[in-house]
Amino acid sequence: MRNNFELLALNIEPVHLYQGTVEFRRCAPLQCATLSQMPPKTNPSVSPLVFVVDDDASVAGSTARFIRSQGMRAESFLSGEDLLNSGRAAEASCLIVDLRMPNMDGLELQQRLKEIRPPIPLILFSAHASREEEEQARRSGAVAFLRKPVSRDDLLRAIHMAVERTG
């Protein structure tokens, strides 16, 4: 099996699909992390692991690639169910979750994740959230609530704030 570095060099990226399966998709060279954007080798036990959950594969993938380009580890999931079924949620330093997804929305996933100990810092983002949904997310413990399209600086600030809570 090739590692993620080799897959990105071949313009292939892993995407977690429903029921815990992984599919490898070819992406255009400019959409995949290029070799020059790859982070330096880091100690996986030190580098934060960020899980991105969004039902839009392009958003999930591009967000995860951006996070990796900043020297962190990142994986994407296309639903809250996929993340929970993976059994890996507790491994994350931080979760970035779309608010509006079919079957299980970001607020429901946030409630389900509260059962996992220790609590996982969560960032919610959405293009169409109501003020009430944003307030509910914050009351429930979200580290940040970001509106799409999210600026890279705002996303990095929120990730660093979330990772500091786990450190």
Image (cartoon, grey):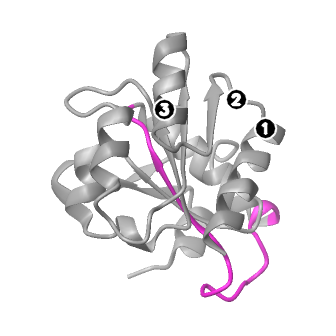
The verdict on residue 94 being magenta is no
At a point 43% along the width and 73% down the height, the residue shown is: 91
x and y, in percent, of residue 50 in the image:
56, 60
Query: How far apart, in angstroms, are the residues tagged by discs 1 and 3?
Result: 17 Å
At a point 58% along the width and 52% down the height, the residue shown is: 64
The crowd level at tag 1 (other Cα within 10 Å; few <14, some 14-19, many 20+) is few
Taking the image as shown, residue 164 lies to the left or right of residue 5, namely right
Which mark, by number, is residue 135? none
At a point 53% along the width and 23% down the height, the residue shown is: 135
Query: Which element is circle 1 on?
Result: helix
The crowd level at tag 2 (other Cα within 10 Å; few <14, some 14-19, many 20+) is few
What kind of residue is marked 2? Val
Question: Relative to residue 59, is residue 83 depicted above or below?
Answer: below
Q: Residue 13 or 149: which is nearer the viewer?
A: 149
Query: Which element is circle 2 on?
Result: loop
For the residues labelled 1 and 2, say whether their Cβ atoms are less than 8 Å apart: yes
Single out the residue that lies furthest toward the front: 139
What kind of residue is marked 1? Asp
According to the picture, the residue beneath numbered tag 1 turns out to be: 154
According to the picture, the residue beneath numbered tag 3 turns out to be: 137
What kind of residue is marked 3? Ala
According to the picture, the residue beneath numbered tag 2 turns out to be: 150
Q: Residue 86 or 89: which is nearer the viewer?
A: 89
For the residues labelled 2 and 3, say whether their Cβ atoms are less than 8 Å apart: no
From which residue to which does the magenta span run? 36-55
Question: Relative to residue 137, is residue 155 depicted above or below?
Answer: below
